[in-house]
Image (cartoon, grey):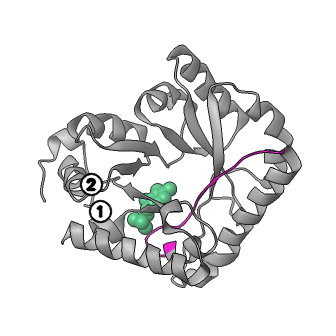
Amino acid sequence: MDLAANLDEIRRRIGSACARVGRDPGLVHLVAVSKGQPPAAVDAAVAAGQLLFGENKVQEARAKIPLCSGRASWQMIGHLQTNKCRAAVELFGMVHSVDSLHLARELQRWAERRERRIEVLLEVNLAGESSKFGYRPEILRREWAELRGLPDLAFRGLMTLAPWTPDPEKARPVFRGLRELREQLQDEFQADLPHLSMGMSGDFEVAVAEGATLVRIGTALFGPRPPRMASPAENPPSL
Ligand SMILES: *Cc1c(COP(=O)(O)O)cnc(C)c1O
């Protein structure tokens, strides 16, 4: 597995997806999803020029981040439990997965205590799958004013997970729906929501065509995730 070659290939594919729709590829940021990967994989990506990483579990991130290059910066992309907000504020520059007022208030509480401002995205459940986390759009609208009143959370945009499907075109309506919701919210609330976090290894080109600014890519970059990682410290680097 040649990580630098994978990275080049992903960048090339992002570039051509942008070219097809006339977007500036400089506005599409790659979040390298390092969940399940050892620190050595992160450091190899850093050496190849990738500095932004996404993790989906606070516990794994807390163990891994201190073992990785200090040049890496980190974002939380997975579901966040309220009892992990304190660590999340300390570890991450951005949380993609804010999906309730309760969670946002808890993040605010810790951001204030730590005198930090944290960037957040609101996760939206557009596919209406009950198994998924995320705001329903009507609830997001209802809570909007209160969310925006939280002073230490910088609301930067929206995030969604498309249902898994072998045909990435099937994800397009979900990605388009997120872009349209962003436009509606910007109009309704005079908000500035520059980021759309959408697209993973199997469907990122479609997401980019629909306006993604953050694509979250794991397996296409790092290869398949190792079966299970007990803790990074117990897992000697294997790259
Ligand atoms: C794992 C994960 C990804 C990346 O998935 P790949 O298919 O490996 O690219 C993206 N987003 C979230 C929220 C994830 O948990």
Residue sitting at x 25%, y 50%: 229
- Tags 2 and 1 in contact by the CB under 8 Å rule? yes
Q: Tell me if I can see residue 128 in this picture.
A: no
Q: Is residue 149 magenta?
A: no
State left or right for residue 231 relative to residue 84: left
Identify the element where label 2 is drawn. loop
Q: Quadrant of residue 154?
A: top right
Give the class, few, some or many, for how many residues have Cα within 10 Å of label 2's Cα (few <14, many ≥20).
Answer: many
Residue 181 position, x and y percent, is: 77, 60
Residue 36 position, x and y percent, is: 31, 54
Q: Which residue is mark 1?
A: 225
Q: Tell me if I can see residue 191 in this picture.
A: yes
Q: Give the label on residue 155, or none.
A: none
Residue sitting at x 32%, y 67%: 221
Q: Which residue is mark 2?
A: 37
State left or right for residue 87 relative to residue 27: left
User: Which amino acid, mark 2?
Assistant: Gln
Residue 207 position, x and y percent, is: 57, 71
- Does residue 238 sit above or below 203 in this rendering? above
